[in-house]
Image (tube, coloured by chain):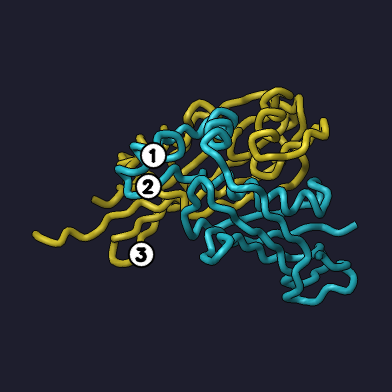
Chain colours: A cyan, B yellow
Amino acid sequence: MTIDLNNARPGDIVAEFSPPPSTPEDLARYAEASGDSNPLHLDPAFARQAGFSDLVVHGMLNMAHLGRLLTERFPAENIRSFSARFEGIVLVGQQVGYCARLLEKTPDGIALELDGSLVGGGRVISGKALVAVD
Amino acid sequence: MGIDHRHVGYTLPKFTLTIAPERLAAFAEAIGEVATGQAMAPPTFLKVIEGEGGSSRRILDELGVDLRRVLHAEQQFEYFAPLRVGDVVTVERKVAEIYEKKGGEMEFIVIETGFFDAAGERRALSRQIVLVRHPKKREQ
């Protein structure tokens, strides 16, 4: 459940989103569309050599999902800034829950604190966004 | 070994591209967006534009960085005006900063990218922070 921004107070969750876990086909599609063809995301043998038990999801795909959390709640042209810190690895088949909390209301809009954590624990991405409000 | 700080200020030759509808559609599909036929680029599409032609790799090669030690640590975007299908965008990328933490075990490269429209107005800014790991050797 998301709550009305007018009534939201700092710390309140204003948007939530949990896309289905990524599959190897999803990563291949993202690699093709983004131009990031690092074998860590595409070649299971390479990923294992690098010490991971399966393919690693592109950090920028996780950030893109965080971006969808914003654009499904706010008009994309209202986003003034958006940043993310990559804190952990997501493997194919792992589901991530994303949420945005109100940080503060400013004259320029609303500042949001963003978080993505594996279902079952462990933060993988955090961030901030500033969104102008009409 | 640490990266030569003389590379701060290194600028990639600027390049220009047009935001093609099929590329935007392929990206939207790849991130699971419902196709709305919307002409505006998703917030992280800037990363695709700036990475055109393997440009990030070219910068790291210029700096002599071992790609196996590299992690994308942080990404920041600022948006001044929307970028849409058909827009002609000129991309300027430079190494803005190099700094280290933990006595040199972690080295950070900040790559700053400006996105300019055909009129020369800056539409967006990207800052990519790359971590290069230099774990201390256990034996000398």
Res. A114 in view: yes
Instruction: Return the residue nearer the eye: B99 or A15.
Output: A15
Q: Residues within 10 Å of mark 1 (few under 14, many from 20)?
A: some
| Residue B57 in which image quadrant | top left
Q: Counting residues from the N terminus, which is met first, the one under dot 2 or under dot 3?
A: 2
Residue at the left extreme, as displayed? B140
> What chain does badge 2 belong to?
B
- Please report whichever mark, 2 or 1, sits nearer to the chain's N-terminal start: 1
Numbered mark located on residue A122 in the image: none
Check disc 2 and report the residue beneath it.
Answer: B70
Check contact, mark 2 vs mark 1: CB within 8 A: yes
Distance between the Cα atoms at labels 2 and 3? 15 Å
Count residues near mark 2 (Cα–Cα under 10 Å), then give few for <14, some for 14-19, many for 20+: some
Up-down relation of residue A94 to residue A35 (above or below): below
- Residue B101 - label: 3
> Is the residue under label 3 in contact with that under label 1 (CB below 8 Å)?
no
Residue density around tag 3, few if under 14, some if 14–19, many if 20 or more, within 10 Å: few
Please tell me if label 2 and label 1 are on a single chain.
yes
Query: Is residue B37 found left or right of A36 in the rendered image?
Result: right
| Precedes in sequence: disc 1 or disc 3 | 1
Kind of residue sitting beneath label 3: Lys
Mark 2 lies on a secondary structure that is: strand
- Residue B82 coordinates in the image, percent (x, y): 77, 40
